[in-house]
Image: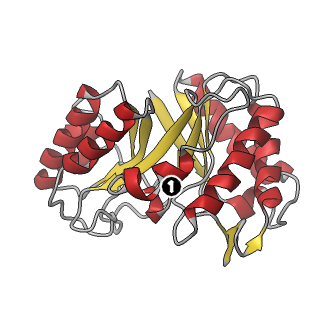
Amino acid sequence: MQQRLPIGWPYIVNYNLGGTLDPTYSGYYDSLVQACLATGAHCILDLHAYARWYNGTVGQSGVTNADLTSVWTQLAAKYASQPDIIFGTMNEPHDLDMDTWAATVQEVVLAIRQAGATNQLILLPGTDFTAAGGFSINSAPALSTVVDTDGTTSKLIYDIHQYLDSDFTGTHPDCVTDGTANLATLATYLRANSRQAFLTETGGGNNQNCVNYMRNQLGFLNINSDVFLGWQGWAAGAFDPTSYALSEVPVGDTDTLLVQQCIAGLF
């Protein structure tokens, strides 16, 4: 079992770029992390920032790699002794140069390891909001240059996202595909290159059509578990469950349709 725990980059350092973890805000986050670990789950620390600090792109326009490695050095040191932590280096980078971004990710990997977190998995996100469709062409070639401190890649896992609406963005409540064609293309690439991926965001509207497509997608991932390590539904915990069409947040004591029949109910 895995749980993904998003945190805002400015929030956790009290809006001080390159600063130390704020004791209060990082304490709130740590309470969430500890609750996750207590369940026996693998807990993904998700820096939810799109490779951005406000309008600056990390390593490419106004924000340095050192600014990013600073926060990851601190988080890695804090959780270095926790084997069930997974480091999600960045949520959904986009509109950036992939070769430059891969160099940034390499620095983050080294920073995490040098802080003492030597054995945990690290997730490597690509461009185009790290979309599964096109990942093998647009992101993986550059990210394939990123290596662990010993030169290996077995603990460096590609981070992918996929929604099942018409443009795979998760901005529409209707599902029109199960996305397995995208995943099949990526699976072929992963096997050919001895790599693995993790679908850390997926979702759909709370309707039977999305349930059916989601079941197909998750079934495909399970069948191909040699290259896909797992998946996470996007729960959007703080969003209003009455207005956010893709919410997986219970209303009172009642789970959403997608959770009942698929995300939890299917497995």
Quarter of the figure with residue 53: bottom right
Which secondary structure, mark 1? loop
Q: Position of residue 159 (x, y in %)?
A: 48, 45
Q: Is residue 236 above or below residue 265?
A: below
Q: Residue at x 20, y 48 (%)?
A: 181
Q: Residue at x 70, y 71 (%)?
A: 60
Q: Is residue 152 above or below residue 244?
A: above
- The colour scheme applied to this rendered structure is secondary structure
Confirm whether residue 234 shows in the render.
Answer: no
Q: Position of residue 253 (x, y in %)?
A: 34, 43
Q: Name, please, the residue furthest toward the right.
A: 20
User: Which residue is labeled 1 in the image?
Assistant: 126
Q: Is residue 112 above or below residue 168?
A: above
Q: Name, please, the residue furthest toward the bottom.
A: 55
Quadrant location, the C terminus: top left
Q: In the rendered picture of this protein, how many numbered marks are placed on residues? A: 1
Q: Residue at x 67, y 33 (%)?
A: 148
Quarter of the figure with residue 177: bottom left
Q: Between residues 229 and 44, which one lies in front from this camera angle?
A: 229
Q: Position of residue 15 (x, y in %)?
A: 79, 67
Q: Between residues 22 and 177, which one lies in front from this camera angle?
A: 177
Q: Residue at x 85, y 49 (%)?
A: 23
Quadrant location, the N terminus: top left
Left or right: 134 with respect to 39?
Answer: left
Confirm whether residue 247 shows in the render.
Answer: yes
Q: Amino acid at mark 1?
A: Gly
Q: Position of residue 18 (x, y in %)?
A: 85, 60
Left or right: 91 with respect to 174?
Answer: right
Mark 1 surroundings: few (<14), some (14-19) or many (≥20) residues within 10 A: many
